[in-house]
Image (cartoon, rainbow, N blue to C red):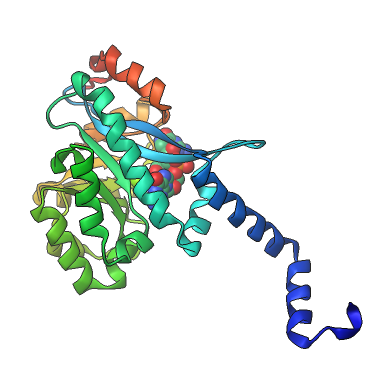
């Protein structure tokens, strides 16, 4: 076999000897199968209004129940879903599944309870994102105002005009818009002025050391001032301790999400969490 090898085949041989490359191909194959074999799961993390001691909604977070490796976090496979385009069918699966789950919770939640769904840039660039979302909402009998799509600043800056049209269209259908990981990307304050966001999520990188880093506290104060001026809901992400929650509350932050309130929960766990209620225990007011 060796004698007849042409240069292209040789190249391929060289490349596939690279273990990273091989692993990537295996992972890609496994991800294709994961969708077919129904190995993806959604976890849900509560978002709490700490002033009222109320539940605002949940964020859906994908996991992969790998047959041998256990529960795999999205950081290890979202990137590959994105570069292979698999995020398109998986993204539809995420919405369908979360909207279905909502019907189990509906009796326990308020009228303004929202389901936050993360969108990848590839989903955002697909020409049929809006009709796809509208179709899945309709098929799931979910009111558009229940859905809040989370996008990052980097999505916005890739094509400002197209983004503006899409965001306006989503908003005109009653779908809510959230800017995720605010402050970590190529933030431009003018995006907040131009685009119809409802919610702004302050990234954990600003909240994690808030007790000991006056500069982080100053940044958060500035974000709160700006966000309040624009009438946005502002969610502080990554709250792990009561002292952080209190500090953010004293700065004027009302909505929070993080391990101190609850880790992301499986569908069975979040259903029990919602049925139990008792969110007053999170009231800081
Ligand atoms: P994200 O949207 O910013 O989600 C927040 C991440 O912070 C989640 O990680 C969550 O589990 C974690 N987290 C929540 N509270 C705390 C805390 O108190 N401390 C710490 N250290 N972490 C906390 P996760 O689930 O691993 O997701 C990571 C990222 O993967 C997400 O960041 C999001 O960008 C992406 N992702 C997750 N699910 C999906 C999805 O369904 N679709 C898409 N397109 N992306 C997703
Ligand atoms: Mg998010
Ligand atoms: Mg986030
Ligand atoms: Mg984040």
Quarter of the image that includes the N terminus: bottom right
Q: In the rendered view, would you say 158 is above or below 285?
A: below
Can the viewer see residue 147 in this picture? yes
Q: Nearer the viewer, residue 94 or 33?
A: 33
Q: In this view, does 118 lie to the left or right of 115?
A: right
Residue at (23% x, 20% y) in the render? 283
Q: Which of 89 and 21 is in front in this view?
A: 89
Q: Is residue 68 left or right of residue 180?
A: right
Residue 254: x %, y % from top left:
20, 33
Quarter of the image that includes the C terminus: top left
Question: For residue 140, what is the image quadrant?
Answer: top left
Can the viewer see residue 47 in this picture? no
Question: For residue 195, what is the image quadrant?
Answer: bottom left
Residue at (90% x, 79% y) in the render? 2
* Count of picture labels: 0
Residue 135: x %, y % from top left:
21, 50
Residue at (8% x, 55% y) in the render? 172
Residue 262: x %, y % from top left:
38, 25
Q: Residue furthest bottom?
A: 7
Q: Is residue 150 left or right of residue 109?
A: right
Residue 111: x %, y % from top left:
12, 28
Q: In the rendered view, would you say 252 is above or below 54?
A: below
Q: Is residue 122 left or right of residue 140?
A: right
**Image region (quadrant) for ligand 1:** top left
């Amino acid at each position: 076999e060796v004698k007849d090898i042409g240069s292209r085949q040789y190249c391929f041989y060289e490349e596939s000897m690279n273990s990273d490359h091989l692993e990537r191909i295996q992972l890609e194959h496994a991800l294709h199968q994961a969708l077919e074999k129904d190995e993806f799961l959604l976890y849900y993390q509560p978002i709490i209004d700490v002033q009222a001691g109320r539940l605002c909604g949940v964020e859906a977070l994908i996991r992969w129940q790998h047959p041998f490796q256990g529960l795999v976090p999205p950081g290890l496979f979202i990137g590959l879903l994105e570069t292979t385009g698999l995020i398109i069918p998986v993204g539809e699966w995420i919405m369908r599944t979360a909207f279905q789950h909502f019907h189990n919770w509906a009796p326990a939640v308020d009228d303004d309870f929202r389901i936050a769904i993360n969108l990848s840039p590839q989903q955002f660039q697909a020409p049929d994102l809006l009709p796809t979302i509208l179709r899945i909402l309709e098929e799931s009998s979910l009111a558009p105002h229940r859905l809040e799509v989370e996008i990052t600043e980097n999505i916005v800056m890739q094509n400002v005009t197209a983004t503006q049209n899409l965001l306006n269209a989503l908003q005109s259908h009653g779908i809510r818009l959230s800017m995720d990981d605010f402050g970590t990307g190529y933030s431009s304050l003018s995006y907040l002025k131009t685009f119809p966001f409802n919610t702004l999520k302050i990234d954990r990188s600003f909240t994690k050391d808030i007790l000991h880093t006056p500069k982080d506290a100053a940044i958060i104060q500035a974000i709160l001032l700006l966000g309040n001026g624009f009438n946005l809901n502002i969610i502080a992400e990554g709250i792990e301790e009561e002292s952080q929650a209190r500090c953010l509350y004293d700065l004027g932050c009302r909505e929070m999400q993080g391990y101190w309130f609850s880790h992301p929960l499986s569908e069975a766990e979040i259903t029990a969490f919602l049925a139990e209620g008792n969110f007053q225990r999170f009231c800081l007011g």
